[in-house]
Amino acid sequence: MVAAWEAAQVAFHDAALTADPSFPALAATMVDPQLGGAESALRGMRARGEVARGPDFYGSPRVSTVTATGATVVSCVHGEEIVIFPRNGRPVPGVLGQPDYELVTSTMVPTSSGWKVADQTVRVGACAGS
């Protein structure tokens, strides 16, 4: 399950490098509402002429709960990936243009093709470096 969670994080990271809302790995690792939210965010980036640059470090993800219908994965992610304007290489203003630590809490659901992220909350500054 943690591997499926990390695959979803990598899918969004890789899609953000070109602001591609149709990046195939998104649908392979996420379901709605998370999939729709990710696609919407990437469409917004593309419309504003933004892309992402830099790595993300996914911390030490752990399964915090498991039920008959799903599970929760939690990790402190160090996001060195920032959103930039490629025409000049400058970061966008605000949180998206700055490296940070984020507490990521993801709801995972089982599907016929394995576990996928169904919903996710990201709280900037809610965890310290690991």
Image (cartoon, helix red, strand yellow):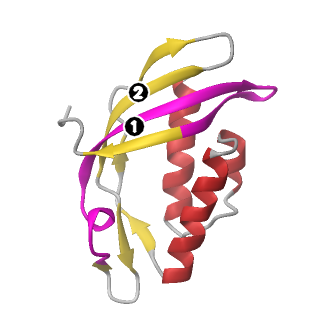
Contact check, label 1 and label 2, Cβ < 8 Å: yes
Label 1 sits on a secondary structure element that is strand
Q: Quadrant of the N terminus?
A: top right
Q: Position of residue 2 (x, y in %)?
A: 51, 24
Q: Position of residue 109 (x, y in %)?
A: 66, 26
Direction left: furthest residue: 128
Q: Is residue 122 found left or right of 34 in the rendered image? A: left
Which quadrant of the view contains residue 47?
Answer: bottom right
Label placed on residue 104: 1
- Magenta span: 91-119
Q: Amino acid at mark 2?
A: Val
Label 2 sits on a secondary structure element that is strand
Mark 1–mark 2 Cα distance, whole angstroms, equals: 6 Å
Q: Position of residue 21 (x, y in %)?
A: 64, 64
Q: What residue is at 57 percent from the left and 19 percent from the top?
A: 71
Label placed on residue 10: none
Q: What residue is at 22 percent from the left and 45 percent from the top?
A: 125
Of residue 39 and residue 10, the one placed in the foreground of this image is 39
Q: Is residue 112 magenta?
A: yes
Which quadrant of the view contains residue 102?
Answer: top left
Q: Is residue 79 found left or right of 130 in the rendered image? A: right
Of residue 53 and residue 99, the one placed in the foreground of this image is 99
**How many numbered dots are placed on residues in this image?**
2
Of residue 46 and residue 32, the one placed in the foreground of this image is 32
Label placed on residue 74: 2
Q: Amino acid at mark 1?
A: Val
Q: What residue is at 60 percent from the left and 35 percent from the top?
A: 117
